[in-house]
Amino acid sequence: MTPTQQIELEAAAFRRLLSHLQTHTEVQNIDLMITADFCRNCLAKWFAAASEEHGVTLDYEQAREIIYGMPYSDWKEKFQTEATPEQLAAYQAKKPAEL
């Protein structure tokens, strides 16, 4: 595999991940944080950081729109639910103790 092919395959896999997350709006960010230690917002932060590293002007809100497939405020209004006490407890249990 050439470096260019690897980049193209990685990009294709990333686009598929985004499509999957955009299709499965029932999966809340807190669920992702509990199970995988990242969420859509993390992806947006990583995307914005990568754009900066490559000299591309893209702020966090623009990156979130790419990741969510719509403005974050729209996604939040349409799909975000209130975290349950069980979800909050699971998330707290995963966080390392404060020093």
Image (cartoon, rainbow, N blue to C red):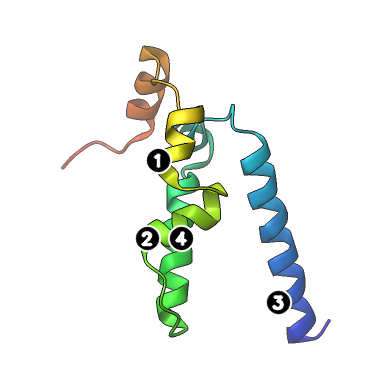
Drawn side of residue 80 relative to residue 88, left or right: right
**Residue 37, percent across and down?**
46, 43
Local crowd at mark 3 within 10 Å, few (<14), some, or many (≥20)?
A: few
Identify which amino acid the numbered label 1 is placed on. Ser
Contact check, label 4 and label 1, Cβ < 8 Å: no
Quadrant of the drawing holding the N terminus: bottom right
Measured in 3D between alpha carbons, the distance from the residue under mark 4 to the one under mark 3, in whole angstroms, is: 20 Å
Location of mark 1 (residue): 73
Q: Is 19 in front, or is 90?
A: 19
Drawn side of residue 83 relative to residue 13, left or right: left
Location of mark 2 (residue): 60
Identify which amino acid the numbered label 3 is placed on. Ile
Identify which amino acid the numbered label 4 is placed on. Ala
Q: Is 89 in front, or is 25?
A: 25
Measured in 3D between alpha carbons, the distance from the residue under mark 1 to the one under mark 2, in whole angstroms, is: 13 Å
Local crowd at mark 1 within 10 Å, few (<14), some, or many (≥20)?
A: few
Q: Earlier in the sequence, mark 3 or mark 1?
A: 3
Measured in 3D between alpha carbons, the distance from the residue under mark 4 to the one under mark 1, in whole angstroms, is: 13 Å
Q: Earlier in the sequence, mark 2 or mark 3?
A: 3
**Residue 90, percent across and down?**
41, 23
Location of mark 4 (residue): 63
Local crowd at mark 2 within 10 Å, few (<14), some, or many (≥20)?
A: some
Q: Which residue shows up at 42% across the image and 81% down it?
A: 53
